[in-house]
Image (spheres, rainbow, N blue to C red):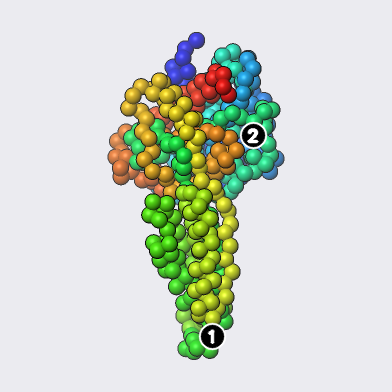
């Protein structure tokens, strides 16, 4: 039998076709019927136990190896973003205002490729593999819903390890894998604030209680809090990305609303930034005689890689692809991921893969989520190889 990499290379053309078909027809959130259809077609005929999500269009496939052993979970997310693609690619999005700008189309194709390569190696497989095709990564809670619907128990026993890949359209050279032990990506929480005052005539602010002024002060006070209250070596990031108040220049409104994304990299900083943000919001509003309500919603925990699984993955990458294909991620990334919810329950590793096109400069190419981000198909074979080999090798380990 050809080795996994040769086989992944042999099917790379088909995987590129699948990826491009998904790219042309991107879908948002938890309901991805056309993407689900394409995944099911790609898995058709393979010796898999396939089940579909009940409240989302997920696909869970289980491959049972010939020998007994543990279970490894491999995950690929499938959703797109509300971004209007600005590219002249022949397979550019045909859906207005929706684009696979985070490369999840490649993740889906690589996971389907791994299912195919591993299905052909069922005899070598000591244990089971769960393929987790996940909708709704971009803020829709897809991983949480799949976990609630039982993906981690799909093969019976809980997985001994879980792995996921994420392509990046910049930063890393093409084909370069990168990960790190410990915190890999930030926790992300959304702070929602409503400042309540008393509306009135714009010419007589002393008769009203102006929520806009207080809300503006809250925005700047939050930034002062970041620099004055947090250690630069255990940082937090706060960005107020939404601010709404008022209807006319001469009318003081009753209330102002703002929301912020709040990123942190340790449980201690996360706990403290929650507590202190609420204190700042209430304190500033109170200082001006107004009241505020504030709460944290949509929690994403930190993505934390297991040191032993990172070591295992690093050895596998070097063995498969030779030296020079792996970089230790120097610092955690301030982005967030809902694969973190899987890694909270199962030790594993989340690995970045450089997918900038060969003619692009990875230092300056448009990054993920940009309307101009381009992800190169050429990484599909090696991404597929790595996913398949991580499962094969991890399950041949006696320790489990
Ligand atoms: Zn994204
Ligand atoms: Zn993503």
Question: On screen, 30 above or below 76?
Answer: below
Residue 240 appears anywhere in the view: yes
Residue at left 55%, top 49%?
A: 300
Circle 2 packing at 10 Å, graded few (<14), some (14-19), many (20+), is many
Q: Is residue 218 above or below residue 326?
A: below
**Residue at 54% across, 19% down:** 397
167, 240: nearer the viewer: 240
Quarter of the image for the C terminus: give it: top right
Report the disc number at residue 208: 1
Label 2 element class: helix
In the rendered image, residue 261, in percent from the top left (x then y), is placed at: 49, 57
> Alpha carbon of mark 1 to alpha carbon of mark 2: how far?
55 Å
Image coordinates for residue 69, horizontal then vertical, percent: 62, 20
Q: What residue does disc 2 label?
A: 152
Residue sitting at x 60%, y 38%: 345
Task: Judge from the rendering whether residue 294 lies leftward or rightward of residue 262; answer left or right.
Answer: right
Residue 342 vs residue 265: left or right?
Answer: right
Label 1 vs label 2, nearer the camera: 2
């Amino acid at each position: 039998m050809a080795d996994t990499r040769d086989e992944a290379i042999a099917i790379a053309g088909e995987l590129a076709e699948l990826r491009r078909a998904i790219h042309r027809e991107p879908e948002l959130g938890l309901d991805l019927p056309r993407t689900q259809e394409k995944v099911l077609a790609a898995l058709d005929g393979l010796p898999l136990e396939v089940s579909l999500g009940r409240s989302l269009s997920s696909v869970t496939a289980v491959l049972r190896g010939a020998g007994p052993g543990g279970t490894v979970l491999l995950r690929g997310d499938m959703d797109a973003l509300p971004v209007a693609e600005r590219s002249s690619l022949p397979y550019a999005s045909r859906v207005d205002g929706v684009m696979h700008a985070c490369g999840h189309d490649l993740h889906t194709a690589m996971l389907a490729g791994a299912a195919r390569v591993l299905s052909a190696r069922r005899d070598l497989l000591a244990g089971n593999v769960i393929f987790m095709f996940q909708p709704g990564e971009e803020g829709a809670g897809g991983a949480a819903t799949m976990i609630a619907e039982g993906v981690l128990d799909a093969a019976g026993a809980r997985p001994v390890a879980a792995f996921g890949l994420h392509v990046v359209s910049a930063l890393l050279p093409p084909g370069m894998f990168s990960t790190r032990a410990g915190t890999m990506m930030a926790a992300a929480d959304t702070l929602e604030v409503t400042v309540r005052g008393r509306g009135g005539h714009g010419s007589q602010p002393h008769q009203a209680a102006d929520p806009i002024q207080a809300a503006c002060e809250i925005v700047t006070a939050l930034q002062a809090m970041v620099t004055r209250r947090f250690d630069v070596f255990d940082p937090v990031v706060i960005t107020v990305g939404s601010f709404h108040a008022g209807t006319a220049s001469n009318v003081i409104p009753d209330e102002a609303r703002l929301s912020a994304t709040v990123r942190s990299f340790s449980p201690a900083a996360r706990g403290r930034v929650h507590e202190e943000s609420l204190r700042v919001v209430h304190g500033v509003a109170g200082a001006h005689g107004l009241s505020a309500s504030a709460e944290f919603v949509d929690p994403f925990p930190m993505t934390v890689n297991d040191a032993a699984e990172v070591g295992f993955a690093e050895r596998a990458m070097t063995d498969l692809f030779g030296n020079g294909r792996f970089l230790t991620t120097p610092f955690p990334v301030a982005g967030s991921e809902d694969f973190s919810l899987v890694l909270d329950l199962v030790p594993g590793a989340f690995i970045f893969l450089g997918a900038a096109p060969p003619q692009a400069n990875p230092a300056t190419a448009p990054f993920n989520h940009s309307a101009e981000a381009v992800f190169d198909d050429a990484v599909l074979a090696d991404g597929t190889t790595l996913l398949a080999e991580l499962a094969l090798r991890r399950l041949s380990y006696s320790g489990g």
